[in-house]
Amino acid sequence: MQAVIYAGLRNGERDQKIHDALLYKHVVEVAKDFHLAPNTIRAAAKRIQNAVVFELCLLGGGSQRLSER
């Protein structure tokens, strides 16, 4: 399991569920299902749509470099 350094989303799980629901329903229907305003649904969908995932691999030897200073 990899650690998440920064998720950036307010409520990533909820936003993903909203995004998935919008594949089959209109904004107004999803807003009713989640008991949220339509603008909140649109904003959540936009956050998920604009999300970017990066993978970070750290190479060994970092502690040696720090001790050489």
Image (tube, helix red, strand yellow):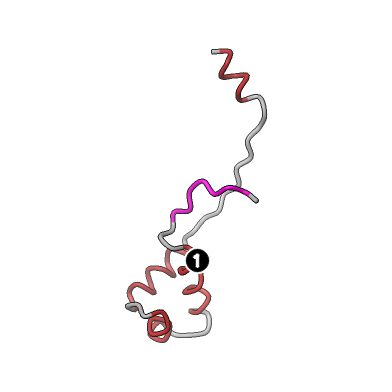
36, above or below 65, in the image: below
| Residue at the farthest right position | 60
Residue 7 in the magenta stretch? The answer is: yes
Q: Position of residue 31 (x, y in %)?
A: 38, 81
36, above or below 62, in the image: below
Report the number of numbered marks. Answer: 1
Residue 49 in the magenta stretch? The answer is: no
Q: In the figure, is residue 2 to the left or right of 17?
A: right
Residue in the picture at 57% in, 49% down: 54
In magenta, the rendered stretch is 2-8
Q: Position of residue 42 (x, y in %)?
A: 38, 73
Instruction: State whether the magenta stretch is mostly helix, strand or loop.
Output: loop
Residue in the picture at 42% in, 84% down: 33
SS assignment at label 1: helix
| Residue at the farthest top position | 68
Q: Amino acid at mark 1?
A: Glu
Residue in the picture at 47% in, 64% down: 48
Residue in the picture at 54% in, 49% down: 4
Q: Position of residue 64 (x, y in %)?
A: 63, 19
Q: In the figure, is residue 56 to the left or right of 21?
A: right
Q: Position of residue 43 (x, y in %)?
A: 37, 68
> Which residue is disc 1 drawn over?
13
| Crowd tier of the residue under label 1, counting other residues whose Cα lies within 10 Å: few below 14, some 14–19, many 20 or above | few
